[in-house]
Amino acid sequence: MPTMTAAQRRAAERAGYDAYLAQCPARQLLDRIGDKWVTLLLNALADGPQRYSDLRRRLAGVSEKMLTQTLRALERDGLLQRTVTPAVPARVDYALTPLGCDLLPLVRSIKTWAETHMPHVLAARADYDHRRTSGD
């Protein structure tokens, strides 16, 4: 087997990912990105670094537990960075990493699409529900 450069090894690894396979790491990442809190959190951090309390206020309805879990998962995946500034009390800020910034246009587009097309989705739901209840 010929020796491969680091770039060739990375290319070979990328070619081996298939998100349709249950155990593929890319599927796990898609599961994470598809989470509503992840999408909203990444969009919130587009405005720059924010404190936990600011994010909690911004993401109406998120529990402390879910926000903490989501922040930790995104930090683990390299999409955001947690910075602790020594103070009393300690200040903790969250910011997008370059990898998170690279993902931002995609999740921003999904959020915008959802906000723009919600009237059409609501109309489709109402039509579907009407057909189901009227027996058509």
Image (cartoon, rainbow, N blue to C red):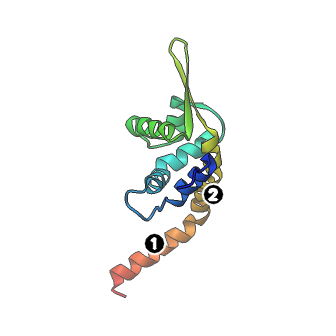
Disc 2 is placed on an element classified as helix
Q: Nearer the viewer, residue 126 or 31?
A: 31
Single out the residue that lies furthest toward the front.
1
Residue 36 lies, in percent from the top left, at 48, 51
Specify whether 49 is left or right of 16. Answer: right
- Badge 1 amino acid: Arg
Residue 48 position (above or below residue 34): above
Tally of numbered discs: 2
Residue at 55% of width from left, 12% of height from top? 87
Specify whether 130 is left or right of 55. Answer: left
Residue 17 position (above or below residue 55): below
Sort mark 1 into few (<14), some (14-19) or many (20+) by Cα contacts within 10 Å.
few
Disc 1 is placed on an element classified as helix
Residue 17 lies, in percent from the top left, at 49, 59
Sort mark 2 into few (<14), some (14-19) or many (20+) by Cα contacts within 10 Å.
few
Residue 78 position (above or below residue 82): below
Residue at 50% of width from left, 68% of height from top? 122
Residue 100 lies, in percent from the top left, at 60, 43
Q: Which mark is residue 109?
A: 2
- Badge 2 amino acid: Ser
Residue 91 lies, in percent from the top left, at 54, 20
What is the CA distance from the residue labelled 2 to the residue labelled 1? 22 Å
N-terminal of the pair, mark 2 or mark 1, is: 2
For disc 1, the marked residue is: 125
Residue at 59% of width from left, 32% of height from top? 50
Nearer mark to the viewer, of 2 and 1: 2
